[in-house]
Amino acid sequence: MSSSKTVRKLQVESPVPADIVIANSVEPLHIDEIAKELNLTPNHYDLYGKYKAKVLLSVLDEVKGSRDGYYVVVGGITPTPLGEGKSTTTVGLCQALGAFLDKKVVTCLRQPSQGPTFGIKGGAAGGGYSQVIPMDEFNLHLTGDIHAITAANNLLAAAIDTRIFHEASQSDKALFNRLCPTNKEGKRSFNDIMFRRLKKLEITKTRPEDLTPEEIKKFARLDIDPDSITWRRVMDVNDRFLRKISIGQGPDEKGMVRETGFDISVASEIMAVLALTTSLADMRERLGKMVIGNSKAGDPITADDLGLGGALTVLMKDAINPTLMQTLEGTPVLVHAGPFANIAHGNSSIVADKIALKLVGPGGFVVTEAGFGADIGAEKFMNIKCRYSGLTPQCAVIVATIRALKMHGGGPEVVAGRPLDHAYLNENVGLVEAGCVNLARHIANTKDYGVNVVVAVNKFATDTEAEMNAVRNAALAAGAYDAVICTHHAHGGKGAVDLGIAVQKACENVTQPLKFLYPLDISIKDKIEGIAKSYGASGVEYSEQAEKQIEMYSRQGFSNLPICMAKTQYSFSHNAKEKGAPSGFKLPIRDVRASIGAGFIYPLVGTMSTMPGLPTRPCFYDIDLDTATGKVIGLS
C-alpha cells in the first residue's frame, strides 16, 4: 500500500501549526481513489460531495465469506480535562500502518457532536499531522447522521405527549375507531405495527371487529404514566438552559403540562442503537423495542406500542451506512455513530468495524477508538460492543501522556483554559513514577480480557527522556506487551511507526481467547459489583431509587442485559478529584436506567450531565469563514 497513489507524503513544519491550518494545507484525494484502494466499486457507495461517501451495507453481503483482518482498540489512561490524544493516536497509528508499513488499514472513528465543537472541546478529527480530512466537513454536519437521529428522537418525543393528550380526552371506543379508521368500503383493519402490539398483548385476533371491549381497551389505551417517562428531546447544541423545561404551556394543550428536558443529540438512545446494530432488520427491531416509560400498571411502553418503530427506521435508513473519509496521508477512514461515552458505550459502530475487517482482509488492520479512559470506553467496548458484534480484538492500545501521569502522581489540578502549572512543563520523574499506578491498573484490567496491551506514550515537546523511560519501565512491569514513544502529532505516521510495529507483533502473538468481565445470566447487581471491583471499589451502595429501578427492570425481564456504567471519566472512582488508582471506596449508585433498544442497563454513578453547557469563551469565537476562498478558519 505504501506504493499506492492514495498515500500522500506530508511536509511537516515545526512548531506544529494549528489543526485547521494543517488540514487546509492538504488537498484531499477524491473519495473514489480511497474507495478503490479498498476494492470498492461505485456500486458499493453513494457520493456525498468529492471527499465523503456512504458505504452501503450491501457490501457486507458480498464479502461475508472473506476472512477478517486484525482488530485493534485504542483506549487511554484516566485523562486530564485536556484529553490525552486518543483520536490523534488512532489516526497516527493508521497512517503509520498504511503509509509506512505497507499494510491495508482502516480507521474507525465516532462522528463528533457539534455541541462541543462550538463549545469547549473543539472537534474530534485528531490533531496536528494525524487528522481526518476534510476536517471542517468531519466536524460539521458530515453526512447528516446526527441530524437524522435528532429528527427521529424528537418525533418519538412528540408522539409520547400527543398520545397522552388524546387518551385523556377520548373514550376507549373513540380511540380505537381513530386508530383503526374505516376504509372506503366501510371496513377496518390492523396494519403491520399494530400486529406487533396485539402479539405483545397476546391477542390472536386479526380483525378489529372481533375484539371485545376489554381487548379494545388494552390495545388502544397505552395509559402512559407521565412520571415514568424517560424519553427526552434532543438537539446538537450545548444549551444548559434546556436541561430542565416545562412543556404543554400553550392554551390548546388543555393543561397537559409536565416537566422534561433536552439532552445533547449524541446522548439519544437512537445513537446507541445505531452504534450497536448489526443490520437494517436488527436496527428496525431495536428502534421498536426502545422503552420510553411505563404504563400506570408498571408495564414498559415501547416505540412500537406508539406505532413508531417503522417511521423511525425510515428516518435512519441512510444513517446506518458508514461514511468513508481519509487521513492526511491518504489512508481510509470509516466514520460512524457517536454515542455519549458516559451514559452510552462511547464507541463507533459495529457495522463500520465489520465492513472494515472484511475489506482489509487477513494481515490488514482495523483500528477503532473507545471513548474516555479504558475503565469506561474499553470496558464497554469489550463487554457490550464485542458481545453484540461477535468480534474479537487482538490488541488494545492504551494512550498515556506524561502530563496526565504527573497529575495522577499528585501534580496540581489541570483545568481547561488555564495555563499548565510549572510541574507539567519541567522534568519531575518522581511525579511520573507515582502516577504510573493509574497506567498499571488500566493495563491489568485490559489484559484480563485476553488481549495484548501496547502502551503508546503520546510525546509532548516538554517531556524528557528520563520521564519517558520511567513510563516505559512501569508499563512493562505492569504486564504490557510493549510500550512505545510516539510523535505522530508532530510528524504524522512517521512518528508512530514503532507503535505500528509493536501493534503488529502484539496482534500476531495473541495466546488467549476474548474473556468478558461478567456473564449475562447473573443479576443486575452482581454485574454492577463486578465492574465496581475492577475500578478498585470495596463494595457498592444503592440509593432507594436505584433499588426500586433494579427490581422493576428485573421484573420486566431485562436483567440479562449488559451493564453500561455512567461514571466520571476523570477517576476510577465516582469522585473526579480522586486521582491515581484509588481503592477501598464504596461506589454509590444513584439511579439505574435502561436503553432496552440499544441493549444495556445503565447505572448512574453520581450526577451525569447529558446536556453540556457553553463556557464563558466558547470555541465559536474563533470560527469564521474566509469569504474569498470559502474555507473554514479557526476550527480546532
Image (cartoon, rainbow, N blue to C red):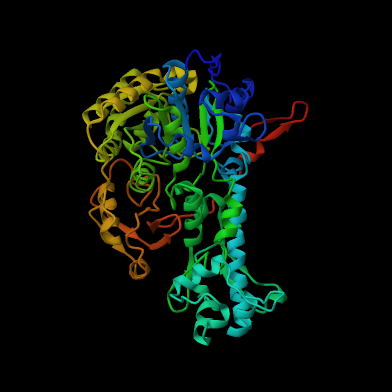
Locate residue 310 relative to residue 378 in the image: left or right. right
| Residue 405 x, y percent position in the rendering | 34, 33
| Residue 222 x, y percent position in the rendering | 52, 75
Q: How many marks?
A: 0
- Residue at the limit of the structure toward the right, as seen here: 628
> Is residue 503 visible in the rendered structure shown here?
yes
- The answer to whether residue 109 is above or below residue 257 is above
- Quarter of the image for residue 102 reads top left
- The answer to whether residue 74 is above or below residue 384 is above
Name the residue: 40% across, 25% down: 364
Locate residue 225 relative to residue 185 in the image: left or right. left
- Quarter of the image for residue 105 reads top left
| Residue 273 x, y percent position in the rendering | 48, 52
> Is residue 290 visible in the rendered structure shown here?
no
- The answer to whether residue 156 is above or below residue 93 is below
| Residue 42 x, y percent position in the rendering | 60, 30
Locate residue 374 relative to residue 237 in the image: left or right. left
Q: Nearer the viewer, residue 465 or 382?
A: 382
Q: Nearer the viewer, residue 270 or 253?
A: 270
In the rendered view of the protein, which quadrant contains the C terminus? top right
Q: Nearer the viewer, residue 440 or 481?
A: 481
- Residue at the limit of the structure toward the front, as seen here: 185
